[in-house]
Amino acid sequence: MTLHAAKGLEFPCVFITGCEEGILPYSLFPGHESDQNEERRLLYVGMTRARKYLYLTYSKKRMIYGKYIESKRSRFLETIEDELTEKISSKLYKKEASQMKLFS
């Protein structure tokens, strides 16, 4: 679901992925700058859809148009007060076990 489509709805748990510069706020095309206030408002709309749990995620590296690019956290995440957040590193979730096979 897009952030635009989430207006007026509520969910027990909300995941907002792609909280990276270039995606939120959107500016992947050279010379294209989005309205920062509108982008911030859309993120706020998405965040306020969560009744109990809210997860904001970003990646350090992302493939876009067949090329890997280094990513930075969205500047919008920096404006969220530290006492309202709990930061979890992806390193906590990496497993050494091999992936299960679908077919033998």
Image (cartoon, helix red, strand yellow):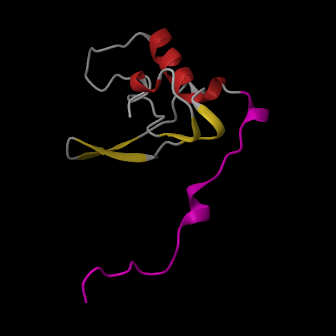
Segment colored magenta: 81-104
Q: In what quadrant of the picture does the C terminus appear?
A: bottom left
Q: Quadrant of residue 98?
A: bottom left
What residue sits 35% from the left and 46% below the top? Answer: 62
Q: Is residue 83 left or right of residue 44?
A: right
Measuring from the top left, give residue 100's x and y in whole percent.
38, 80
Say how many tags the image has. Answer: 0
- Is 95 colored magenta in this rendering? yes
Q: Note whether 58 is above or below 33 in the view shown.
A: below
Q: Is residue 103 left or right of residue 25?
A: left
What residue sits 43% from the left and 38% below the top? Answer: 18
Measuring from the top left, give residue 41's x and y in whole percent.
52, 15
Q: Is residue 92 left or right of residue 5?
A: right
Measuring from the top left, give residue 51's x and y in whole percent.
65, 35
Q: Note whether 47 is above or below 93 in the view shown.
A: above
Of residues 20 and 104, the one drawn nearer to the viewer in this rendering: 104
Q: In what quadrant of the picture does the N terminus appear?
A: top left
- The residue most toward the left is 66
Measuring from the top left, give residue 39's x and y in whole percent.
46, 17
Q: Note whether 70 is above or below 50 in the view shown.
A: below
- Is 77 colored magenta in this rendering? no
- The residue most toward the bottom is 104
Q: Quadrant of residue 82?
A: top right
Q: Is residue 104 left or right of residue 69?
A: left
Q: From the image, give the main secondary structure of the stretch colored magenta.
A: loop
What residue sits 46% from the left and 46% below the top? Answer: 60
